[in-house]
Amino acid sequence: MSGKPVPPRPGRGAGAQRLAEILRVDQAGELAAVAIYRGQRAVLGEGAGHARIAGQLAQMEAHEAEHLARFDALLTERRVRPTVMAPLWRLAGFALGAGTALLGEKAAHACTEAVENVIEQHYAGQIAELDAREPALAAELARFRDEELAHRDQAVSEGAHQAPGYALLSAVIGAGCRTAIKISEKL
């Protein structure tokens, strides 16, 4: 999703349907983010000399777990079903995290940067869309977006751009995220 808000759909129930899509995709994204950090920690968390990145990953995973818990609650409160893709996203997220970690710390950071770049644009569009009709939710999304941006900035400062094959890695991860967003909104 670009940073532009989605225009309102016509018809009865369209606003509720769109809100369901937003909550569903955001919950799926946070579920995948937790899995990515778990995959990265599975590879880097126990290795000698990885205490610094292990702590960073644990902290970022904790933020994502907080976001996930909030979206889980919102799905229940609003009676929105989660995406049917959740098992696949969990597996894919773990594999992405472990795979990038196997390439090294800088690749793990490049993964974080690529994901958070897409998520920042995604949240920005949702915030603009929801600001008038769901201001409390828009404010929560803004807080989550700011935490995601902090993750991205930390990844860049830790050398994300020096990862092997950075441009390709970033492009592939970004495309995968955008695809997962579109699928999770509907399924």
Image (tube, rainbow, N blue to C red):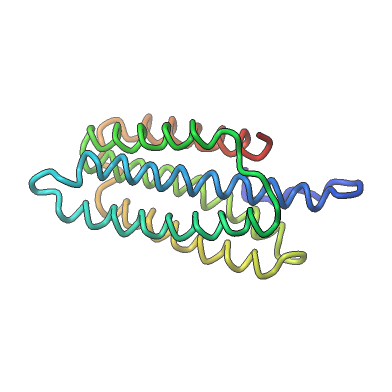
Q: In the picture shown, does residue 149 fall above or below 185?
A: below
| Whole-percent x, y for residue 163 in the image | 26, 38
The residue at the far left in this view is 48
The residue at the far right in this view is 11
Q: In the picture shown, does residue 83 fall above or below 148?
A: above
In the foreground, 70 or 48:
70
| Whole-percent x, y for residue 31 in the image | 47, 46
- Quarter of the image with the C terminus is top right
- Quarter of the image with the N terminus is top right
Going 33% across and 38% down the picture, which residue do you hit? 97
Q: Is residue 152 left or right of residue 6?
A: left
| Image quadrant where residue 61 sits | bottom left
Going 30% across and 30% down the picture, which residue do you hit? 165
In the foreground, 75 or 49:
75
Q: Is residue 178 left or right of residue 36?
A: right
| Whole-percent x, y for residue 55 in the image | 23, 57
Q: Is residue 152 left or right of residue 163?
A: right
Going 57% across and 49% down the picture, which residue do you hit? 26
| Image quadrant where residue 56 sits | bottom left
Going 61% across and 68% down the picture, which residue do you hit? 139
Count of numbered badges drawn on the protein: 0
In the foreground, 148 or 183:
183
| Whole-percent x, y for residue 171 in the image | 44, 33
| Image quadrant where residue 142 sits | bottom right
